[in-house]
Image: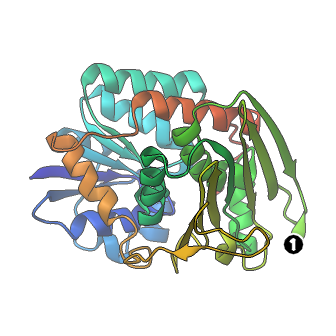
């Protein structure tokens, strides 16, 4: 049994993480939560995920727990993580990483020195179709990779877009990080990055809301497109990997999860669409974070190795930072 608590309720995924760990009382003893911002308590303190839980100070919670869910507002994630790992606590940290690259690297280095787990909350790592894609790549069925197309768009309401004005890089920083994570895991750091951060000013809200990054490798191109202004963007969210032997395409990525696969035998007609659908139990609607939390437990107990190493987490942050011109927090508006 791992004693776990949550610092911060400001992150948009925070409540769902708490709900996930509370599903598994055989794995986690939930101690409580900490939130220093009284405005956040007014906004979210009565959400179902926190019902019946004791509220502590940050220091009290760290002392009482073996592991911490870090679900603060984005701008406080890395500093909070540093405090926890320095105290020898395992952390699940939501995304994207904040602070300077030096601060982020310090946090990871401290965690490695203390031999504590750092699990980043990039949810697509635990998407069953993405995991199947990793398997196909490792088995050699995709062949030499030439192309990755990754899209994660939405038609965001005005209120959410106002919140996105807090961040340099806008929606590329907040959502593009999910896709960059997968690309860097598969391909490593690119040789060259070209970025287009466009401002449509739709609804009178000015931020980088229509964005493209092209990551160049020796033979491959990876394209990351994220937008806050794409009608039915959620339905077009995609992760496609194509190589010398086959192509895998996930679209939509979730709700409903849909995956197709083709290889040179299946695609036996050059000018026709030839592919097979790969069936999955779609857990993305009701249990998006369940496997993530079960893996967090396994990583801590040493029964499973975290495939996303400290080195990967830093490489991902380096690439994300280069794409958006450095992590910048312009304001801290939570309204």
Q: Name the residue nearer the viewer: 325 or 164.
A: 325
- Which element carries disc 1, helix, strand or loop? helix
Query: Whole-percent x and y of residue 126?
Result: 40, 58
Q: In the picture, which quadrant includes the C terminus? A: bottom right
- Vertical order, 203 against 194 (above or below): below
- Vertical order, 171 against 187 (above or below): below
Q: Is residue 247 left or right of residue 63?
A: right
Whether residue 300 is visible here, answered yes or no, is yes
The residue depicted at 36 percent of the width and 31 percent of the height is 83
Identify the image quadrant of residue 89: top left
Q: Is residue 49 left or right of residue 138?
A: left
Whether residue 332 is visible here, answered yes or no, is no
The residue depicted at 27 percent of the width and 74 percent of the height is 51
Q: How are the residues colored?
A: rainbow
Query: Whole-percent x and y of residue 271?
Result: 79, 72
Q: Name the residue nearer the viewer: 110 or 182.
A: 182
Q: Is residue 53 left or right of residue 315?
A: left
Query: Whole-percent x and y of residue 36?
Result: 41, 50
The residue depicted at 40 percent of the width and 68 percent of the height is 288
Total labels: the figure holds 1
The residue depicted at 68 percent of the width and 31 percent of the height is 190
Task: Please tell me how crowded label 1 is: few (under 14), some (14-19), or many (20+) other residues with Cα within 10 Å.
Answer: few
Query: Whole-percent x and y of residue 213?
Result: 77, 45
Q: Residue under label 1, please give it.
A: 203
- Vertical order, 57 against 290 (above or below): above
């Amino acid at each position: 049994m791992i004693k776990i608590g949550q610092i911060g309720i400001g992150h948009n995924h925070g409540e769902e993480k708490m709900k996930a760990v509370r599903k598994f009382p055989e794995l986690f003893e939930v101690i409580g939560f900490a939130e220093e911002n009284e405005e956040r308590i007014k906004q979210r303190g009565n959400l179902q995920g926190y019902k019946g839980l004791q509220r502590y100070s940050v220091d009290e919670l760290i002392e009482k727990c073996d592991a911490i869910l870090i679900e603060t507002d984005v701008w406080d994630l890395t500093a909070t993580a540093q405090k926890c790992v320095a105290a020898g606590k395992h952390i699940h940290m939501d995304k994207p990483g904040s602070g300077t690259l030096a601060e982020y690297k310090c946090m990871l280095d401290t965690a490695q020195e203390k031999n504590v787990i750092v699990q980043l909350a990039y949810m697509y790592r635990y998407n069953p179709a993405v995991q199947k894609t990793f398997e196909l790549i490792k088995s050699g069925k995709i062949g030499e990779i030439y192309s990755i197309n990754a899209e994660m768009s939405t038609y965001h309401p005005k209120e959410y877009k106002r919140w996105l004005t807090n961040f340099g890089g806008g929606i590329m920083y907040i959502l593009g990080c999910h896709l960059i994570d997968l690309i860097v895991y598969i391909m490593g750091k690119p040789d060259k990055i070209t970025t287009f951060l466009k401002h449509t000013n739709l609804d009178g809200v000015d931020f980088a809301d229509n964005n493209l990054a092209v990551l160049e490798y020796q033979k491959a191109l990876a394209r990351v497109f994220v937008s806050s202004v794409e009608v039915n963007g959620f339905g077009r969210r995609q992760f496609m990997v194509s190589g010398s032997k086959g192509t895998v395409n996930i679209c939509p990525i979730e709700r409903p999860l849909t995956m197709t696969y083709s290889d040179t035998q299946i695609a036996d007609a050059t000018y026709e669409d030839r592919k097979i659908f790969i069936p999955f139990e779609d857990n993305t609607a009701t249990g998006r974070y369940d496997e993530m939390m079960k893996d967090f437990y396994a990583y801590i107990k040493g029964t499973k190795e975290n495939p996303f190493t400290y080195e990967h987490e830093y490489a991902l942050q380096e690439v994300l930072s280069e794409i958006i011109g450095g992590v910048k927090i312009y304001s801290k508006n939570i309204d």
